[in-house]
Image: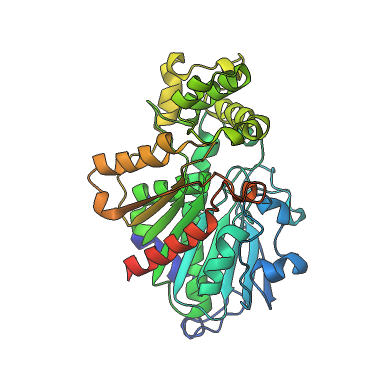
């Protein structure tokens, strides 16, 4: 286990041995910080760290975040600073960003007008390190926070091929967020002359799962977190493998009652066709391939409950418990049609309650919210965008931590 003492040792060792004196470091004069443990890094001074500038300058990849936000989301600007792109040692090559063909890529952004805080994020879904640039980074950078994000160590629809054993690819996600958080704290200390006064974990979907996981397993590393529709994995259910097969069977058959019984909210029917075409089959297949690769049947007829105990043992290594150790704000849309609220947001709030950690948890159910805000543009009168709720939750958490 990585300890607090080790983090401090990494900070001190890096500042002394990075080509700068300790006095230089703590007077905040490092224009080219060094990311400890990185195999490769590239530092750039930018006039604009938000997507208002990074799209044109080539310091983000629009495809990473396409479809995650709605067109009406305000776009902050006026944030000059330093961006560091790079990667940690890794043997997989699913991430083609920057022409590197190398996984474990990260981005760290350091605004000149720093407020003392750091936000650390893992990519949603199986996207890459710039996936949160519009949804999260733009807003927190404009507030003055440093921002760091990781691709989680594997990306794309074949992410499950990474690792030797079932569950290894997802386990790597935990490690990569921890690794980046420690490294980013060091980089902040190099750049500004002191470590961050508060470090916040923030993420969407699988990134929200990682916020919860970090606050349960590594609460000493963070001061709090915002979990935006995080995925819930429980060995005995619920988890995506317990409800997605029902959707794959019931929707084409017109079995409306079965869909409702599986957790898909009444009122979400107008979203079912899109999710059937785009999300359900892909999500079921890739996560079943990661957690139960020996199954060779039709995913629409996958029965998690009847699978060998070894499958549940694999999920148990990844599952959430609700035993958070730092303040967490969770938000979930009532019309989430990929991760239905009852089996995810509501169920996780129940775990926190059962673990006796309610004082550390605030949970907001967003009426009309869906899993991705891109659909808000298609259904502006029927869906509520989640991004403004995230920004409000972030403000709430900052006040709570103060």
Percent x, y of residue 1:
37, 49
* Vertical arrangement, residue 251 with respect to residue 178, above or below: above
Residue at position x 52%, y 44% in the image: 206
Counting labels gives 0
User: Residue lying furthest front in this view?
Assistant: 381
Look at the image and tell me whether residue 15 can be seen.
no
Q: Is residue 66 above or below residue 315?
A: below
Give the quadrant of residue 254. top right
The residue positioned 72% from the left and 57% from the top of the image is 61
Is 146 situated above or below 86? below
Which quadrant of the structure image shows residue 4?
bottom left
Please, is residue 61 above or below residue 50 in the view?
Answer: above
- Regarding residue 188, the answer to whether it shows in the image is yes
Q: Position of residue 223 (x, y in %)?
A: 36, 62
Give the residue drawn at x 48%, y 58%: 390
Residue 300 lies in what quarter of the image?
Answer: top right
Which residue shows up at 66% across the image and 36% down it?
157
Foreground pick, 88 / 149 = 149
Q: Position of residue 260 (x, y in %)?
A: 47, 26
Residue with the most extreme left position: 356
């Amino acid at each position: 286990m990585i300890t607090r003492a080790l983090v401090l040792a990494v900070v001190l060792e890096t500042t002394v041995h990075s080509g700068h004196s300790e006095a230089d470091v703590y007077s905040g004069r490092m224009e080219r910080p060094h990311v400890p443990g990185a195999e490769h890094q590239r530092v750039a001074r930018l006039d604009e760290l938000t997507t208002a500038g990074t799209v044109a300058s080539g310091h983000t990849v629009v495809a990473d975040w396409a479809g995650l936000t709605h067109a009406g989301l305000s776009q902050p600007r006026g944030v000059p600073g330093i961006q560091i792109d790079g990667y940690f040692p890794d043997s997989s090559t699913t991430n083609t960003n920057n022409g590197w063909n190398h996984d474990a890529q990260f981005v760290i952004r350091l605004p000149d007008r720093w407020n003392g805080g750091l936000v650390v994020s893992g990519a949603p879904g199986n996207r890459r390190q710039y996936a949160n640039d519009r949804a999260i980074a733009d807003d927190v950078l404009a507030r003055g926070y440093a921002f760091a994000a990781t691709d989680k160590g594997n990306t794309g629809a074949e992410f499950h091929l990474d690792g030797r054993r079932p569950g290894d690819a997802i386990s790597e996600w935990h490690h990569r967020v921890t690794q980046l958080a420690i490294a980013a704290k060091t980089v902040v200390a190099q750049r500004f002359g002191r470590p961050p006064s508060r470090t916040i974990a923030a993420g969407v979907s699988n990134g929200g799962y990682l916020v919860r996981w970090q606050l349960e397993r590594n609460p000493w590393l963070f001061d709090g977190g915002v979990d935006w529709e995080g995925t819930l994995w429980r060995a005995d259910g619920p988890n995506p493998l317990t409800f997605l097969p029902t959707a794959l069977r019931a929707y084409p058959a017109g079995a409306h009652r079965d869909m409702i019984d599986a957790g898909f909210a009444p009122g979400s029917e107008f979203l079912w066709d899109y999710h059937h075409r785009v999300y359900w089959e892909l999500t079921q297949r890739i996560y079943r391939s990661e957690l139960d690769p020996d199954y060779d049947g039709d995913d629409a007829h996958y029965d998690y409950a009847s699978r060998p105990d070894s499958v549940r043992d694999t999920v148990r290594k990844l599952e959430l418990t609700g035993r958070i150790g730092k303040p967490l704000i969770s938000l979930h849309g009532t019309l989430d049609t990929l991760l239905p609220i009852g089996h995810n947001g509501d169920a996780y709030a129940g775990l926190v309650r059962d673990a006796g950690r309610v004082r550390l948890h605030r949970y907001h159910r967003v009426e009309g919210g869906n899993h991705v805000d891109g659909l808000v543009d298609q259904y502006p009168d029927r869906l509520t965008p989640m991004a403004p709720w995230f920004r409000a939750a972030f403000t709430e958490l900052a006040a709570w931590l103060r």
